[in-house]
Amino acid sequence: MNNNFTVDYIILGCLSINPMSGYDIKRLISISTSLFYNASYGSIYPTLKKMEEAGLVEAEEAVENGRFKKIYALTDEGRKEFMAWLEEPPHPIVIKNDMLLRLFFYRQLPREKVLAITAAHIEQLKAFKLELEEIESAEGGWADKYQYNTLRWGKDFYDFQIGWYEKLLHELENETIK
Amino acid sequence: MNNNFTVDYIILGCLSINPMSGYDIKRLISISTSLFYNASYGSIYPTLKKMEEAGLVEAEEAVENGRFKKIYALTDEGRKEFMAWLEEPPHPIVIKNDMLLRLFFYRQLPREKVLAITAAHIEQLKAFKLELEEIESAEGGWADKYQYNTLRWGKDFYDFQIGWYEKLLHELENETIK
DNA sequence: AATGAATATATCAAAACGATATATGGAGAA
DNA sequence: TTCTCCATATATCGTTTTGATATATTCATT
């Protein structure tokens, strides 16, 4: 585990809160961190296996509601590894922003199409923000002050984006930028 | 090219501005879009080869300053493909934000370490913003109004992040959040 | 003449994605 | 009751992407 910008630590982090299955990890991520850090089944399950072999996690096969489950928990070694990671300074942010990539080339598109796409994008951002607020009101149990702040970042980031594209749209409509 | 959230279109986009080599594409990306959409040599060169076979780009072997270069240019087919992509609505943003991921778990870290990491992160963001402003004053030739706006987004996004973490830091210092 | 930086192409192992296969339990409808 | 659909749960697989490195050449500096 030489590179500390991998899916390994989000998994260790989930298990540091509670022992859980790969499916639980995926669900926890999707309702809490997916906006700023996501992971797929295709990385979660192989990584759990790899970390079990490395002695960072242990699996206990359990039956819950009559359904088979493999509950993973941190070992002492795993918790040590996670805490060491937690103290390190963070890596720079990595973004794939498809809208901005397209914007970079929009000179080649007729003005009215740019306006339409931008307006639609603003509506989509507003819809995503609403979704996030629904998650906020539905959940609540797991939220300590730090976790709550990551959720607040999500909302603030949507507000930033919505405001930014609204300003752009108005400028394009009024053609005040040269 | 079924999935339109791949490296293919950023390459077609670069070539839509000017014919250039894989090395040129990498450099153009790193000084213009890397903040919101990056690509590595390991994806650029194989993709150029794949798209040449598919007839979307053509290579011309040239000698520039006595140095061998493979200049790629869009074919009519390639430009058609790119323009079709450009009209589509964008995919949602994808982020890997290591700082926020760590924040999600910071309850497990002593308060003073959280404060120190957050303060250091703010300084790093300010340094990155300065770097971006240096790129801005160095370049200028390629900047049409849309391209300039993507650069402005970068600066605005740094301002948003700096402000956000400064607010967080003050709240943590004063412990006004429950 | 030597060194090192920038230019330029290319490849490879490891990681991650995205989609899908498989299977079961539970809820509600027909 | 049985059928269907959805949520739960684990797992895999081809493709894509990353990150690092290998190789080679030119140019400017020492």
Image: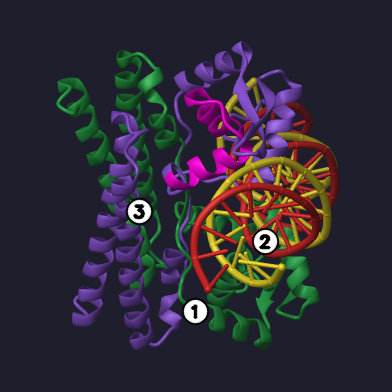
Chain colours: A green, B purple, C yellow, D red
Label disc, if present, on residue B52 of the rendered structure: none
Circle 2 or circle 3, nearest the eye: 3
Q: CA distance from mark 2 to mark 3?
A: 25 Å
Residue situated in front as seen by the camera: A139 or B146 = B146
Residue situated in front as seen by the camera: C24 or D25 = D25
Q: Chain of mark 1?
A: A
Q: Secondary structure at mark 1?
A: loop
Of callouts 2 and 3, the N-terminal one: 2
Residue named by callout 2: A22
Which amino acid does the dot numbered 1 rest on?
Answer: Glu
Residue neighbourhood size for the residue with mark 3, other residues' Cα within 10 Å, grouped as few (<14), some (14–19), many (≥20)? many
Label disc, if present, on residue A88 of the rendered structure: 1
Circle 1 or circle 3, nearest the eye: 1
Q: Main secondary structure of the magenta part?
A: helix
Q: Does the CB distance between marks 1 and 3 fall below 8 Å? A: no
Q: CA distance from mark 1 to mark 2?
A: 26 Å
Residue named by callout 3: A154
Q: Secondary structure at mark 2?
A: helix
Q: Position of residue B137 (x, y in %)?
A: 28, 48
Q: Which residues are magenta?
A: B8-31
Q: Is residue A139 left or right of residue B173?
A: right
Give the residue displayed 26% in from the left and 47% down from the top.
Answer: A160
Q: Position of residue A120 (x, y in %)?
A: 34, 25
Q: Does the CB distance between marks 1 and 2 fall below 8 Å? A: no
